[in-house]
Amino acid sequence: MTETENGGVPVSRSPDEQFAVIEACLFAAGHPLTYARLGEVLGLTPAECADAVEKMAAGYNNSDLPRGVMLARYPDSCQLCTKEQYGAEIKQALGIRRGGRLSGSLLEVLAVIAYNQPSTRTFVDAVRGVDSSYAVNALLEKNLIEPCGRLDVPGRPTLYRTTTDFLRVFGIGALDELPAVKLKTDTGENIEITPGSSFFGEPEEG
């Protein structure tokens, strides 16, 4: 629960001071910072830092005063970001004319991967009934999905999963916050697909 300053002397920090340091670092970064990195700054373990951020978020996101920003928490990192309901005002203030909406095909591919990850492109193609090469490459460029290994079958196709940016863009902290999807099979059976379920098991790294 200490930090070492330039002189090497450990300095105790109160919870309020820890919160202030976390807020300053996140504001300056403008992107997610890992609990490990913030822990190095505060002299905390990643788990202790995650606990501090959780306590900070409880008050930060539930303030009686209206806030335009929120403290978003992810499995291994956190970020200060603007609230979605103020998107129009932010675009106007910054002179942003075009939105960053995803096309229907990109959302379709993203949903297949999110609910069945890790997934291969061939699996995505089979679910959609069309070639998904362009959509997969576009999602990779936007850093909404990433390679996470290869499937142990002939050809060893690449497996894909969603990223922390995916969680940030959709305003969730973990995959289990995605809603369950109910589908009807060709035989008329009703099934429920839960977020993050996988048809393949653990991917091989590499």
Image: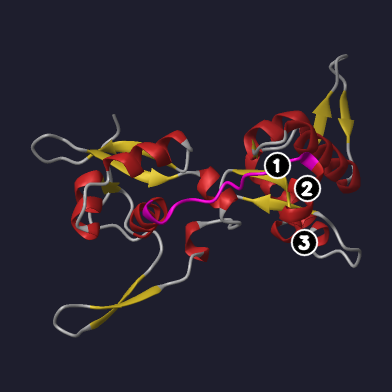
Dot 1 and dot 2 residues touching (CB under 8 Å): yes
Is 38 located above or below residue 16 in the figure? above
Q: Quadrant of the C terminus?
A: top left
Amino acid carrying mark 1 in the image: Ile
Secondary structure at numbered mark 2:
helix
Q: Say what secondary structure mark 1 lies in.
A: loop
Report x, y in % for residue 16.
90, 47
Q: Secondary structure at mark 3?
A: helix
- Spot occupied by residue 78 in the image (x, y as percentages of width and height): 66, 45
According to the picture, the residue beneath numbered tag 3 turns out to be: 58
Cα separation between marks 1 and 3: 32 Å
Of the numbered discs 3 and 2, the one sitting upstream in the chain is 3
Which residue is tagged 2? 92
Residue, disc 1: 96
| Amino acid type, residue under disc 3 in the picture | Ala
Tell me whether the residue at label 3 lies in contact with that at label 2, contact meaning CB atoms closer than 8 angstroms. no
Q: Which residues are magenta?
A: 94-105
- Pick whichever, 104 or 57, lies toward us: 104
Q: Name which residue lies at 42% across and 72% down.
A: 180
- Observer-nearest of 136 and 173: 136
Q: Quadrant of residue 141?
A: top left
Q: Residue at x 54, y 43 (%)?
A: 165
Q: Residue furthest left?
A: 154
Q: Nearer the viewer, residue 104 or 152?
A: 104
As drawn, is 45 to the left or to the right of 161? right
